[in-house]
Amino acid sequence: MTPDERWLRTMWPFVRDHLAPPPARVVDLGCGPIGGYVPMLRASGYEAVGVDPDAPHGADYHRVEFERADLPRHVDAVVASTSLHHVADPDAVIDQISDTLAPGGTVVIVEWDWNAFDELTARWCFQRLASSEPPGWLHRHRDEWTSSGQDWDDYLREWTQREGLHAVERLVRSLNRRFQRLLVARGPYFFPDLAGTSDADERAAIDAGRIQANRVDYVGTKPSSAT
């Protein structure tokens, strides 16, 4: 099982539990090359489409940036898993999510709080890396940091600036302006890429104060139109 498959399998119950019952209409933003939650959604009776430039081919997917996608209106839910911190203009994308949703529709966001990726957390991850060919994203961070000779905080700051990543605090503020917040919670993030490490193992390390929780879950609803 690949890290992406481990991630999707683990996060699917959280996503499913915050959706309206099938056959609700769902858009998976940033579904990636294996289709994100779309296969599980459709197998469960949902009318689901995925949006990503690298999405699989097929009628269930839009192979395009979300900003340029021709999406249905008045869908029941939008799911975005670790995709908003990459977009060029998160406020514009979150506006488009709101426009796509029906009044009362649900937004389910899973994000990476890279500001919480401190050195203790990084070292804990690097000690548990699973073998990967080609090397995974954590392998690349380990190797690039080691070769840089920098302090971890300087290395991470320069990397996030080069990548143009958005802080989760900014994303949550933008979401709060458009949606009625139902949930913000933190949890494990790195376990799919770690050898012999489950999400429960990572959560135990978080609870013990050995590492920081890097995952942020957000659920909100679009306010109903005024009557």
Image (spheres, helix red, strand yellow):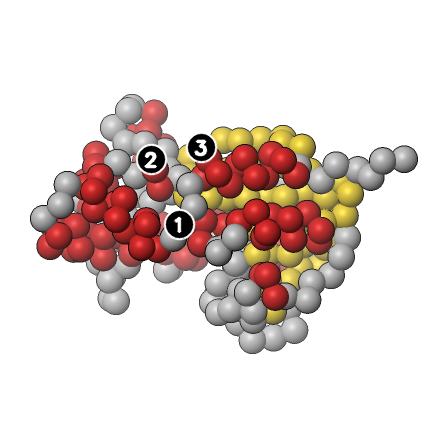
Quadrant (top left/top right/bottom left/bottom right) for the N terminus: bottom left
Relative vertical location of residue 209 with respect to residue 100 in this rendering, above or below: above
In the image: residue 116, left or right of residue 130 = right
In the image: residue 4, left or right of residue 156 = right
Quadrant (top left/top right/bottom left/bottom right) for the C terminus: top right
N-term-proximal mark, 3 vs 1? 1
Q: What residue type is labelled 1?
A: Leu
Secondary element type, mark 3: strand
Q: Residues within 10 Å of mark 1 (few under 14, many from 20)?
A: some
Relative vertical location of residue 72 with respect to residue 218 in this rendering, above or below: below
Q: Is residue 188 visible?
A: no
Give the residue number, with chain letter if any, for mark 1. Answer: 165
In the image: residue 195, left or right of residue 149 = right
Across and down, in percent, residue 104 comes to 76, 40
Q: Residues within 10 Å of mark 2 (few under 14, many from 20)?
A: some
Real-space CA distance between mark 3 and mark 2, rounded to the nearest whole angstrom? 11 Å
Real-space CA distance between mark 3 and mark 1, rounded to the nearest whole angstrom? 19 Å
Numbered circle sitting on residue 37: none
Give the residue number, with chain letter if any, for mark 2. Answer: 116
Give the residue number, with chain letter if any, for mark 3. Answer: 186
Real-space CA distance between mark 1 and mark 2, rounded to the nearest whole angstrom? 14 Å
Query: What's the residue at 16%, 55% (across, down)?
Result: 143
Q: What residue type is labelled 3?
A: Arg
Asked where in the image residue 136 lies, by quadrant, the reply is bottom left
